[in-house]
Image (cartoon, rainbow, N blue to C red):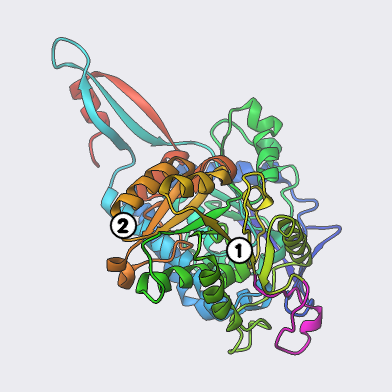
Amino acid sequence: MTDIESHLEGRWILGKGKKATLVNPSTGEPLAEASTEGIDMKAALEFARAAGTDLREKTFAQRGEMLRAMSRAIHAHRDELIGLAIANGGNTRSDAKFDIDGASGTLAAYADLAAELGDVRVITDGVGVQLGRGARLFGQHAWVSRHGAAVHVNAFNFPAWGLAEKAAVALLAGVPVVTKPATSTALVSHRIVRVLVDAEACPPGVLSFIAGGTGDLLEHLRGQDVLAFTGSSDTGALLRGGPSVIAHSVRVNVEADSLNAAVLGPDVDDGSDLMNLFIGDVARDMTQKAGQKCTAIRRVYVPRGKEDLVVQKLSERLAAVKVGDPARDEVTMGPLATAKQLEDVRQGVSRLEKCAKIVFGSRTDVTPLGEGTDKGFFMSPVLLLSATPDRTDAVHTHEVFGPVATVIPYDGSAARAASWVCAGAGGLVSSVYSDDKAFVKSLVLAIAPFHGRVTIGSSKMIGQAIPPGTVLPQLVHGGPGRAGGGEELGGRRGLAFYMQRVALQGDRAVLEAVLKRE
């Protein structure tokens, strides 16, 4: 069994004391142990901050070269990382590629952005403004790198992409990173950092790694630091309320729960390509990563009278899903990540059953493929139907983070559909499937204030459609309300979290000299 080390202060450090055990979720077999007990987190954070000095001296283009090297190093170890994701994450090969390629792809995308920004260290924000009667007195906003460190606390479901998507933006902004993955699935992120260290893809201290708990790390955050978290809303609230966070006005970004929705328009007919796209997207989101995606569709809204048809079509798709050991080629859905995760999902389904009926699958009965899977954390996909919904139902208030979705009928109007979607109190992404432009416009504009992203499926886009559960580096990821109120990625928009916008005023010639390209 492997001991996972942290990489702090430019060296690998093994924690002491009681260790957490990482297991294979398909068999329950122990794989590795991790601990951070005895590690000086204050010193580790100070070392990371100090590394920011040299990082800020690099131009955006030079930082982009570093991101490109990181992307290539990860891609070079793609097959090895996929194997670890299968063993420790319960991912099928397809799910593992989704995570690993998302990591290298996001780093490459931000390397491309860096080339566009060029050999500068400061970004001008908008057009300058004349402040006096003459042209000399001038004002200009600009973005500059903060002088702290970025602490990233990531979720268990995307150990590769979660690490890379946050790190890509922070490092391009000139802020060193201390990344802490969820311990239960940390083998992938640990291996990625070791690959990057061995390849000397980034200087010491620029990317630090915590294997295990954060200890007292967050107590040492200061005003130039930032904290980005992906996980439960309860944990997000605790982090926001931390004494150091409050005392030093530490910037916090939270991506939390999300009851994402998919809405089928009244104009979509049975047998149409658009209906097939809708069914395919819902089924994919239910089963990809065993439904353990923050962007997965949880609520499926269909015009009243079509709910039986949609249930039938989804059930046919889900019946073809083969649950079991993801190392087997024929398996298309692996286990939940941990025993606790399986317990939570089963309890969540029980909660939904108070307002909906299971129409496919079971929260307990499953026969997974593969040897030794009797001790794994498996369940079948579960589809429910809420025939007579109410806004107070659990389906609108509780996210079941697994292969679970609920079909809910609405009366066919865009206004009514919007009222149900918005009952989720804020989401990362919801989707609309329709060729009726008036319906789409009304619905999209009504739900947009409650989401970070809205995807629109139409007949003419089917050949180019990207599944709503796919997070793109060019578009923002995050959402208001229940979703945490945060915002990540979005191309250069993501840099704002790690930089300070400052208003400069004075002699225009002097300001232009200050902001002049290198």
| Tag 1: amino acid | Ala
The magenta span reads 364-382
Q: Residue at the far top: name it.
A: 133
Which of the image's four quarters has the N terminus?
Answer: bottom right
Q: Position of residue 454 (x, y in %)?
A: 41, 52
Residue 62 appears left or right of 302: left
28 with respect to 402 (left or right): right
Say which residue appears at 74% left-offset and 84% top-offset.
367
Residue 163 lies in the magenta-colored region:
no
Q: Which residue is mark 1?
A: 405
Which sits in the foreground, 214 or 450? 450
The residue positioned 70% from the left and 87% from the top of the image is: 369
Q: Is the residue marked by circle 2 packed among few (<14), some (14-19), or many (20+) residues within 10 Å?
A: few
> How many labels sit on residues?
2
Residue 334, quarter of the rendered image = bottom right
Side of 40 where 103 appears, left or right = left
Secondary structure under the numbered disc 2 in the rendered image: loop
From the viewer's side, name the closer residue of 223 and 264.
264
Q: Is 501 drawn above or below residue 57 in the view shown? A: above
* Position in image of residue 113 (x %, y %): 32, 54
**Residue 464 found in image quarter:** bottom left
Query: Nearest the camera: 430 or 459?
Result: 459
Residue at image mark 2:
436
Quadrant of image for the C terminus: top left
Question: In the rendered image, which quarter is residue 267 located in?
Answer: bottom left
Magenta: main secondary structure: loop
